[in-house]
Amino acid sequence: VQLQASGGGLVQAGGSLRLSCTASGLTLANYAVGWFRQAPGKERAFVAAVGSKRGTKNYTDSAKGRFTISKDTAQNTVYLQMNSLKPEDTSIYYCAADPWITTAQAMGVRDQYSYWGQGTLVTVSS
């Protein structure tokens, strides 16, 4: 089982990036998938998630209106479209997946996830 996060990079404030989380060894249609981020010296924090069955979505307050999470079951990939990026969005972004998460609340809890990708760095310059 492997989750591969990609799409990070350097972007100016106000710009956009699209992160991808591609899975091998598991079918993301059957998993809740979340994005978390970790800045230097800080704990890993929830950003956004999409559920398995009904496609319920959950966002942290700072992501609402700027970020959009989506799941492409044909590509076995989850995307995080990030618009209007701010310097405080600078972090390593990780994707995670779990087959047993069933509520929007649980999707925001780091310890609920069983599988993690390696992270992709997003740097937003001012």
Image (spheres, rainbow, N blue to C red):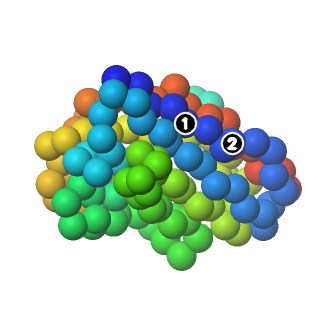
Q: Secondary structure at mark 2?
A: loop
Disc sitting over residue 56 in the figure? none
Which quadrant would the N terminus be assigned to in this image?
Answer: top left
Please identify the quarter of the rendering in which residue 40 is found: top right
In percent of width and height, residue 70 lies at 45, 62
* Three-letter amino acid code at the position of disc 1: Ala
23 over 13 or under it: above or below? above
Crowding near the residue tagged with mark 2, few <14, some 14–19, many ≥20 C-alpha atoms within 10 Å: some
In percent of width and height, residue 58 lies at 34, 64
Residue at x 81%, y 52% (from the top left corner): 11
In percent of width and height, residue 88 lies at 67, 53
Disc sitting over residue 8 in the figure? 2
Per the model, the C-alpha gap separating discs 1 and 2 is 8 Å
Residue at x 48%, y 39% (from the top left corner): 22
- Asked whether residue 6 is in view, the answer is yes
In the image, farthest residue toward the front: 74
Q: Secondary structure at mark 1?
A: strand
Q: Which residue is mark 1?
A: 5
97 over 118 or under it: above or below? below
How many numbered badges does the structure rendering display? 2
Residue 70 horizontal side relative to residue 20, left or right: left
Please identify the quarter of the rendering in which residue 3 is found: top left
Which quadrant would the C terminus be assigned to in this image?
Answer: bottom right
Residue at x 72%, y 62% (from the top left corner): 16
Q: Are marks 1 and 2 in contact (CB under 8 Å)?
A: yes
In percent of width and height, residue 123 lies at 75, 44
* Three-letter amino acid code at the position of disc 2: Gly
